[in-house]
Amino acid sequence: MEDHEMGDDATPKLTWDEAKGLCEEVGAEFEKGLKDGERLFQLKATFNNRRVSLIDQQKSARQTVIGQSVGVEIQRIQQYEDERDNSAEMVRRIEELDRLKHELQHKLHELKEEQLVCEANIENLILQYDFAQQQYAEECTASGRDIPRLKCVPTCDIL
């Protein structure tokens, strides 16, 4: 290859044997590259398979650990609840609520009675006022005096 012929345009020219040799070398390198590429694809596939397998193993291990932790926690809570006896406390609370209920019912009854008494007293006061006003008007008429104008007291109809 060292003694390339130089043509008129000053570019080296190869002989047929030299060109054939170069093509064979390039072909051999290409074949080697194909084999290397195939090995790389195989290595990549093996790596991916092992990676997926490792991820699955990690998931399984996590689920096992979590499952065991949850199971232990559930057992601990159940044991705690079993050891606790809430019945006496609940009975005490129910009795207290029942006592408060009766107390409030009694107070409500008293308030209703007081309301009735107040309403009766108000009605009685209104009747007394009407009677006193009528009596005063009659006295003024009997004595011949003019009935003074009374201030209008608005009545409320709450009863």
Image (cartoon, helix red, strand yellow):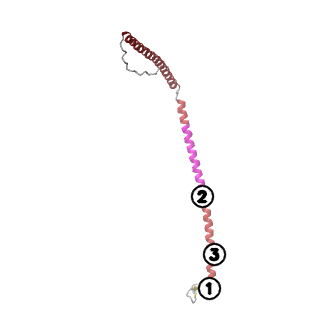
Question: Residue at 61% across / 70% down in the picture?
Answer: 33
Q: Dot 2, how many residues are within 10 Å of its Cα: few (below 14), some (14-19), or many (20+)?
A: few
User: In this rendering, would 29 be left or right of 154?
Assistant: right
- The prevailing secondary structure element of the residues shown in magenta is helix
Q: Position of residue 125 (x, y in %)?
A: 42, 15
Q: Label 2 sits on what residue type?
A: Asn
The numbered mark at residue 15 is 1
Q: Label 1 sits on what residue type?
A: Thr
- Residue occupied by mark 3: 27
The numbered mark at residue 55 is none
Q: Position of residue 110 (x, y in %)?
A: 46, 17
Q: Position of residue 73 (x, y in %)?
A: 54, 38
User: In this rendering, would 94 be left or right of 53?
Assistant: left
Q: Earlier in the sequence, mark 2 or mark 3?
A: 3
Q: Secondary structure at mark 1?
A: loop
User: In this rendering, would 125 be left or right of 83?
Assistant: left
Q: Dot 1, how many residues are within 10 Å of its Cα: few (below 14), some (14-19), or many (20+)?
A: few
Q: Write the start and end of the magenta stretch as one range.
A: 50-74
- Residue occupied by mark 2: 48
Q: Position of residue 139 (x, y in %)?
A: 38, 10
Queried whether the magenta region covers residue 55, the answer comes back as yes
Q: Label 3 sits on what residue type?
A: Gly
**Which residue is more in the foreground, 152 or 148?**
148
**Which residue is more in the foreground, 142 or 125?**
142
Q: Are marks 2 and 1 in contact (CB under 8 Å)?
A: no
**Which residue is more in the foreground, 96 or 109?**
109
Q: Secondary structure at mark 3?
A: helix
The quarter of the image holding the N terminus is bottom right
Q: Tell me the CA gap for discs 3 and 1.
A: 18 Å
Residue 62, relative to residue 139: is it above or below?
Answer: below
**Which residue is more in the foreground, 83 or 132?**
132
